[in-house]
Amino acid sequence: MSPKMACQSAKTLIKIFEYFGYTISKRKAGDHIAMRKDGSPRPVIFPDKKDLPTFIILNNLRTAGITREEYFEALEKL
């Protein structure tokens, strides 16, 4: 059973998505961060905030094709 999802900062999410091969896109809309990966059809986008709600994290993991288990493994390695 996976641990419970908790709010994370944008800085932490950037590190996690970089771990999976994403890079920060040159495109930036206001206070949102866009990250792209070669071969991925859609970017992951999230606000540049200190506490991101879990639904934003889960939506971006789904977009990136990253499982909860992979997410928690990456989180432990940071």
Image (cartoon, helix red, strand yellow):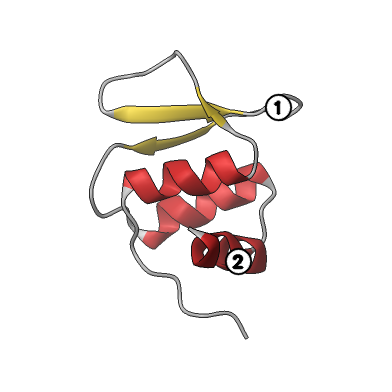
- For the residue pair 56 and 72, the one nearer the viewer reads as 72
In the image, is 77 to the left or to the right of 39? left
Q: Residue at x 67, y 61 (%)?
A: 67
Q: Position of residue 74 (x, y in %)?
A: 57, 59
Looking at the image, tell me whether mark 1 or mark 2 is earlier in sequence order.
1
Residue farthest to the top, as pictured: 26
Foreground disc of the pair 1, 2: 2
Residue 35, x across and y down, in percent: 51, 29
| Residue sitting at the far bottom | 1
> Could you say where residue 7 lies in the image, as x and y percent from the top left?
33, 63
Q: Is residue 29 left or right of residue 27?
A: left
Q: Residue at x 28, y 37 (%)?
A: 48
Establish if 37 lies above or below 67: above
Give the percent coordinates (x, y) of residue 19.
59, 45
Picture disc at residue 73: 2
Amino acid beneath label 1: Pro
The label number, if any, that marks residue 65 in the structure image: none
Q: CA distance from mark 1 to mark 2?
A: 24 Å
14 above or below 40?
Answer: below
Label 1 residue SS: loop
Q: Quadrant of the N terminus?
A: bottom right
Q: Amino acid at mark 2?
A: Glu
Q: Residue at x 71, y 30 (%)?
A: 40
SS type, badge 2: helix
Query: Where 27 sits versus 62, above or below?
Result: above
Q: Residue at x 43, y 57 (%)?
A: 55
For the residue carrying disc 2, how many other residues have a C-alpha within 10 Å: few (<14), some (14-19), or many (20+)?
Answer: few
Single out the residue that lies furthest toward the right.
39
Q: Is residue 40 left or right of residue 9?
A: right
**Label at residue 41:** 1
Dot 1: within a 10 Å radius of its alpha carbon, few (fewer than 14), some, or many (20 or more) residues? few
